[in-house]
Amino acid sequence: MLYALNRNAERWALLIFYVMLVLTMFIEVLRRELLSYSSIWGEEIVRYSFIYLAWIGAAAAVRERGHIRIDVIMAYVGRRAKAVLYILGDLVMFVVAGIAFYWSLETVLVSAKFGSVTHGLRISQVWFLAAVPIGFGLVMLRLVQSLLRDLGDLRHGRPVYEGGKMFD
């Protein structure tokens, strides 16, 4: 079960938020065009679904090494140097994600302390502000997994995982 969760957790979460976003947007467009009426809660659901989509998608991209990177130099270096460069990049990204996690968590705690709510849904904003630290937490988890994979590849002399490529 843990293997399936590790393999597909982001995919299922992304699917849920994407479907919620598309359905709500579709319903709101129909309401606006047919009934000349729209709701503020629909706009909020779409906005917050998109925020969760972005942050969970960032973690999924780290897992698949699908995030934006400049890898021109990778074609000119050997196996070991490539692994070291990926490890160095992941370490730098982990530090940045850790700092961002800390500061985004502070925002969530301040919102919880003062009890702020959304304008339309009247739900605690903590649930929506938490998307950022959840996203960075997932990114850090995936970076640790990537580092362990790369260190194992380096130690055993295997080619480092480069992820899928959009253009070859």
Image (spheres, rainbow, N blue to C red):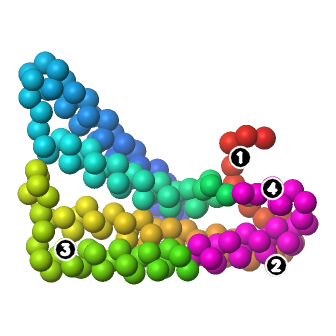
Residue flagged by tag 3: what amino acid is it? Ser
- The answer to which quarter of the image holds residue 81 is bottom right
Up/down of 154 relative to 121, above or below: below
Task: Report which residue position mark 3 lands on.
Answer: 111
Q: Residues within 10 Å of mark 4 (few under 14, many from 20)?
A: few
Task: Report which residue position mark 1 lands on.
Answer: 165
Residue 143 x, y percent position in the rendering: 58, 71
Q: Is residue 152 visible?
A: no
Q: Are marks 3 and 4 in contact (CB under 8 Å)?
A: no
Q: Mark 2 to mark 1: distance in Å?
A: 25 Å
Q: Residue at x 8, y 57 (%)?
A: 122
Disc 2 or 3, which lies upstream in sequence? 3
Q: Are marks 2 and 4 in contact (CB under 8 Å)?
A: no
Q: Residue at x 55, y 68 (%)?
A: 142
Q: Mark 3 to mark 4: distance in Å?
A: 43 Å
Task: Report which residue position mark 2 lands on.
Answer: 155
Up/down of 91 relative to 56, above or below: below
Residue 59 x, y percent position in the rendering: 50, 61
Disc 2 or 4, which lies upstream in sequence? 4
Mark 2 or 1, which is nearer the eye?
Answer: 1
Residue 55 x, y percent position in the rendering: 42, 59
Task: Report which residue position mark 4 lands on.
Answer: 72
> Which mark identifies residue 104?
none
Residue flagged by tag 2: what amino acid is it? Arg
Residue flagged by tag 4: what amino acid is it? Val
Q: Mark 4 to mark 1: distance in Å?
A: 13 Å
Span colored in magenta: 70-94
Residue 56 x, y percent position in the rendering: 43, 58
Secondary element at image label 2 = helix
